């Protein structure tokens, strides 16, 4: 059984990862897709207005990518703290 200090450090680092990824998700899904949609619509991305693309597809793609990034980071974290 791992000691409390080790587990505290593990969760502290895990929460740091979560804060980073949730911040990215917030920026993409709320700022880009809602608040900045009008200014971004002046830019075209694959033939679509960028604000529309973020609102309809982009935020979902980013969310899926963030899931894979989180899995990779946590796997490395598990190995680092030997809690795999």
Image (spheres, rainbow, N blue to C red):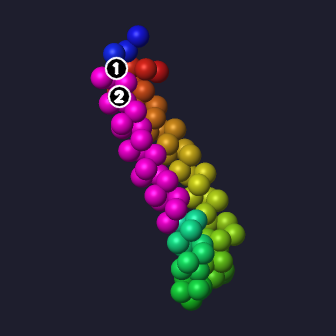
Position of 40 with respect to 46 (left or right) is left
Q: Could you tell me which residue is drawn at 46 percent across and 31 percent down?
A: 75
Task: Name the residue tied to disc 1.
Answer: 4
Check whether the beta carbons of the residues at disc 1 and disc 2 lie within 8 A of each other. yes
| Percent position of residue 36, x then y | 54, 80
Q: Is residue 65 left or right of residue 12?
A: right
* Numbered badge on residue 20: none
> Disc 1 on helix, strand or loop?
helix
- CA gap, disc 1 and disc 2: 6 Å
- Residue 67: give x, y in percent of width and height: 56, 46
Furthest toward the bottom, the residue is 42
* Quarter residue 2 falls in: top left
Q: Specify the farthest residue to the left.
A: 5
Tell whether position 48 is magenta: no
Q: Which residue is mark 2?
A: 8
Q: Position of residue 83 (x, y in %)?
A: 43, 20
Q: Is residue 66 above or below residue 39?
A: above
Q: Is any atom of residue 33 visible in this view?
A: yes
First to last magenta residue range: 5-27
């Amino acid at each position: 059984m791992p000691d409390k200090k080790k587990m505290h450090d593990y969760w502290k680092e895990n929460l740091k990862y979560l804060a980073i990824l949730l911040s990215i998700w917030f920026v993409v899904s709320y700022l880009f897709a809602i608040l900045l949609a009008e200014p971004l619509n002046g830019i075209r991305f694959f033939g679509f207005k960028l604000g529309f693309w973020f609102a309809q597809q982009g935020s979902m793609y980013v969310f899926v990518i963030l899931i894979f990034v989180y899995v990779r980071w946590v796997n490395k974290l598990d190995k680092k703290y030997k809690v795999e």
